[in-house]
Image: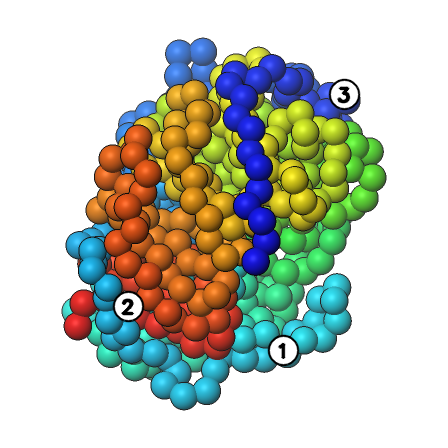
């Protein structure tokens, strides 16, 4: 077990909003940035606040609420476009039961090759959150796993509703279920493709796939870890090809009543710029986190530490998105950007490169894109390397909860950045913490799921229970009607709740 990592909180830290100079775009791709983006400091929406109401891509009033009202369920990573909805209770306050395991015997395992060579991968890992939703009078659980397949299960029994959909390599990210009720599932894989699957047939059917090499230029690799957001027939997705993609889906129903799509990539842009490449000294700029949408702005970060906001207000009228926000964290930023009701961003960064910028802006931070200096506060986590944050932060009442690679879990005052409380778990903790019904759920790498009462955000969390599941709990659980659905690195997928 590693030692707990020391953390120092600084409030309202003043740092430069950009790198060493204004960003440059790669010629012939996204086109020049807007005048606002050149300085990296302009307001994301307007001087009077974010866009709201009709015509807004992601209405700020829905922060913390379900994706929409057309599909009942938890249908995307962290539940909605701002990544701030975690499911429904009642969450057990006493030790729950293991309701079922899938598969009943054996594991979800396959071989895959990365920078460390060929290895056998089992179960599910970062981020790996399943989608849980109501369809045709039953509750579905859909997830991708390390066995190179997408699975479609009955939430009550764990039995298959549809056959598995095979892909050519492992699936690390989280699936998205269509928010408008079309029987469609969107998923990426390490096999080079992002797919649209139909689930209104006897078996899941691929309707379309996007290659990681379909756009140019690209960098790093061909995986698709990020979770897509679908709004008004447009899909927003970042890839480990280091590009940000916007796809017009053109969803319809055919004469036979089956769903169809005719997707077209209507916009793409590199997730890097020349200043970033110069500052980091390498080309690891993949987009591994998921996009977040607030108002008329799409936010995402990349492995070079570049946090960006792109204005999509004119997209439906044929106007290309423009970059309106730029902030450099100094290091790999794979955790998804989370946006609160005011439009502030909560960002978790890793500590691997050891740059001076990492020390300047910290590994846990709050950014206000409306400010010329966006950094509101920061927390440090740099006592070892690697260190920092892989899990996506969770908002609850007046705090934000981060967990770190070293096993520390923090409750932080959202307004000031002051540490309210901290506790330690066996590292690594890459799972994104979840809070439902005032209960914080977070797993550890010794195979336990832990529950804490955080109703009083100023008090030390009260332990409620811990349950041995087996295998590093790296995937983020989906919580639906009080039941937890999650996989572990031991190889199986589990439902945990009250029998």
Please tell me which residue is depicted at 51% across the width and 54% down the height of the picture. Answer: 429
- Whether residue 155 can be seen here: no
156 over 265 or under it: above or below? below
Q: Position of residue 154 (x, y in %)?
A: 27, 75
Using the numbered discs, state the Cα–Cα distance from disc 2 to disc 1 in whole angstroms.
26 Å
Using the numbered discs, state the Cα–Cα distance from disc 1 to disc 3 in whole angstroms.
43 Å
Left or right: 495 in relation to 364: left
93 over 268 or under it: above or below? below
Marks 2,1: beta carbons within 8 A: no
Marks 1,3: beta carbons within 8 A: no
Numbered mark located on residue 496 in the image? 2
Mark 2 or mark 3: whose residue is earlier in sequence = 3
Q: Position of residue 462 (x, y in %)?
A: 28, 46
Left or right: 96 in relation to 103: left
Residue identifier under label 3: 21
288 over 300 or under it: above or below? below
Task: Mark 1 vs mark 3: give the one in front.
Answer: 1
């Amino acid at each position: 077990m590693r030692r707990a990592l020391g953390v120092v909180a600084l409030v309202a830290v003043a740092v430069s909003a950009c790198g060493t100079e204004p960003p440059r775009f790669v010629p012939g791709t996204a086109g020049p940035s807007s005048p606002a983006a050149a300085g990296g400091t302009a307001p994301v929406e307007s001087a009077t606040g974010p866009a709201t109401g009709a015509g807004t891509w992601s209405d700020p009033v829905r922060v913390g609420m379900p994706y929409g009202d057309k599909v009942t369920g938890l249908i995307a990573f962290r539940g909605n476009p701002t990544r701030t909805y975690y499911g429904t209770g009642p969450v057990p306050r006493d030790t729950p039961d293991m309701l079922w395991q899938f598969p009943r015997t054996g594991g979800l395992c396959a071989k895959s090759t990365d920078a460390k060579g060929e290895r056998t991968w089992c179960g599910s890992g970062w981020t790996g959150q399943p989608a849980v939703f109501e369809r045709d009078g039953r509750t579905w659980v859909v997830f991708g796993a390390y066995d190179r397949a997408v699975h479609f299960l009955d939430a009550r029994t764990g039995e298959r509703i549809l056959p598995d959909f095979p892909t050519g390599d492992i699936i690390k990210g989280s699936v998205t279920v269509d928010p408008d009720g079309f029987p469609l599932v969107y998923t990426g894989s390490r096999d080079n493709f992002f797919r649209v699957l139909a689930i209104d047939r006897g078996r899941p059917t691929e309707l379309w796939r996007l290659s990681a090499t379909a756009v140019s230029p690209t960098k790093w690799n061909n995986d698709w870890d990020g979770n897509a957001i679908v709004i008004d027939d447009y899909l927003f997705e970042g890839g480990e090809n280091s590009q940000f993609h916007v796809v017009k889906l053109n969803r319809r129903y055919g004469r036979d009543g089956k769903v169809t799509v005719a997707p077209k990539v209507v916009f793409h842009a590199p997730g890097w710029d020349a200043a970033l490449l110069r500052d980091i000294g390498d080309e690891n700029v993949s987009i591994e986190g998921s996009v977040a949408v607030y108002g008329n702005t799409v936010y995402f970060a990349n492995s070079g530490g570049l946090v960006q906001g792109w204005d999509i207000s004119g997209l439906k009228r044929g106007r290309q998105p423009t970059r309106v926000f730029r902030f450099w964290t100094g290091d790999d930023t794979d955790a998804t950007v989370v946006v609160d009701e005011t439009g502030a961003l909560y960002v978790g960064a890793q500590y691997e490169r050891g740059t001076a910028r990492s020390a300047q802006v910290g590994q846990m931070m709050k950014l206000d894109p409306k400010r010329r200096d966006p950094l509101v506060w920061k927390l440090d986590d740099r006592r070892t390397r690697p260190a920092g944050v892989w899990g996506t932060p969770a908002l609850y009442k007046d705090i934000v909860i981060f967990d770190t690679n070293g096993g520390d879990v923090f409750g932080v005052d959202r307004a000031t950045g002051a540490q309210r409380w901290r506790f330690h778990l066996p590292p690594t903790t890459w799972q994104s913490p979840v809070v439902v019904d005032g209960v914080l759920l977070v797993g550890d790498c010794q195979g336990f799921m832990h529950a804490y009462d955080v109703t009083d955000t100023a008090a030390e969390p009260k332990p409620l229970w811990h349950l041995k599941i087996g295998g590093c709990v790296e995937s983020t659980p989906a919580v639906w009607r009080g039941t937890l659905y999650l996989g572990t690195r031991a190889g199986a997928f589990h439902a945990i709740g009250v029998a």
